[in-house]
Image (tube, helix red, strand yellow):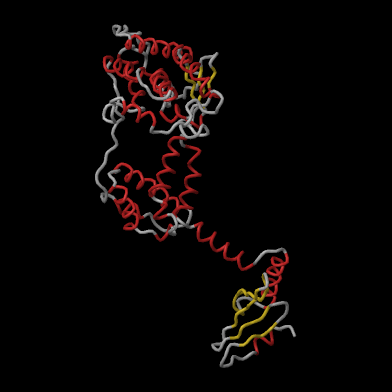
Amino acid sequence: MPLTDTAIRNAQPSAKPRKLSDARGLYLLLNPNGSRWWRFRYRWQGKQKQLSLGVYPDVGLAEARKRRDELRRQVAEGIDPGEQRKAAKARKAGAGSFEAVAREWFEKHKPTWAASHSEKIIRRLERDVFPWLGSRPVGEITAPELLQVLRRIEGHGAVETAHRALQNAGAVFRYAVATGKAERDPSGDLRGALAPWKPDHYAAVTEPAEAAELLRTIDAYTGSIVTLTALQLAPLVFTRPGELRHAEWAEIDLPAAEWRIPAEKTKVKEALIVPLATQAVALLRALQPVTGSGRYVFPGVRTAARPMSENTLNAALGYMGYGKERMRAHGFRAMARTMLDEQLGFPAYLIEHQLGHRVRDPLGRAYNRTKHLKERRAMMQAWADYLDSLKQGGNVVALHGRTA
């Protein structure tokens, strides 16, 4: 006989738990201490199972029957409500884990970062932080726990990586606080806990004689043609290494001698046109039969579906005797910035614009990607010709003449 509210209220506890049956698998468990728990019994794959539906009177008779009917519907549709409940709990717990929050934070900011920058951040978290803190509830992680993870990185001699991991973790914790998943950021308590580190400027060759030696050394490189071409093209275009690695054939117009880098690939999220000197066009035409059937101009060694590794150019420079204290792939930008100014006399705004920096005119207006394109095209050709003259042992080219 189905239960009524009156029957439930009048039921008295006994020395042992007893069941007050309703209908269709629903019953009320009356405990010796007077507590009343709703239970739902069902069969799944031949086994008897049951679930709790709440406590009476917080969950009244009508609500208990409503919950029972929903569970019976799941069973009829071939869903085990018990497993469904476990999965929901797991998802809820995972949503508050450090890894889940970190990935949510990463996806929020990824559109504003250059591809190379975002790759470094997520790789650092996946390699150095998630294995130890990923499954922990973000709001329960303490400063000593975080420090232990950072000390592990530091112990491998990667002091810079440890500091950057601390910065990334701090950003995740602050995001967790802002979104109500944590009450505070424990990374702030670790100020001074790691070995000191200061960001260094990228090593770069900026003197004509040294640049000539470097360029001749690159031309003599005996590694793969893909790496060789990237090394030869790097000083001619002086883009950021990540922009060069991720270059796609679809972005390059060889007849027009232009490489158009889309905004999402640049650090400042503004599209950039790179005029290609005749020397750069020749290098790309020579490489096209090798990699032109794929997406990337400089594909990875293991798979053409991914671009060249971020370490490839620096490793090649190191192999040729240019260690990190002497020249880095990023150093080609400093080489161009310095020598275009000091040796060729091009105006700073043209150089900065071609470097992909945010440049504004005297009225504060941002230059668009096509601004001064004719002048920049001339500058890029003059720069390529100058580099050729250095390699051939020629004298320093006379100043181009400053216009601003």
Residue 369 to residue 170: above or below:
above
Across and down, in percent, residue 1 comes to 75, 85
Across and down, in percent, residue 387 comes to 35, 13
Q: Residue at x 27, y 27 (%)?
A: 326
> Which of the image's four quarters has the C terminus?
top left
Residue 215 visible in the shown view: yes
Residue 56 to residue 199: above or below:
below
Farthest residue, direction bottom: 15
320 relative to 286 in the view: left or right:
left
Farthest residue, direction front: 222
Question: As rendered, which of 197 and 319 lies closer to the eye?
Answer: 319
Across and down, in percent, residue 16 comes to 57, 90
Question: As rendered, which of 30 and 9 lies closer to the eye?
Answer: 30
Residue 352 visible in the shown view: no
Q: Quadrant of residue 69?
A: bottom right
Q: Residue at x 57, y 62 (%)?
A: 87
321 relative to 231 in the view: left or right:
left
Farthest residue, direction right: 1
Residue 165 to residue 246: above or below:
below
Across and down, in percent, residue 286 comes to 48, 16
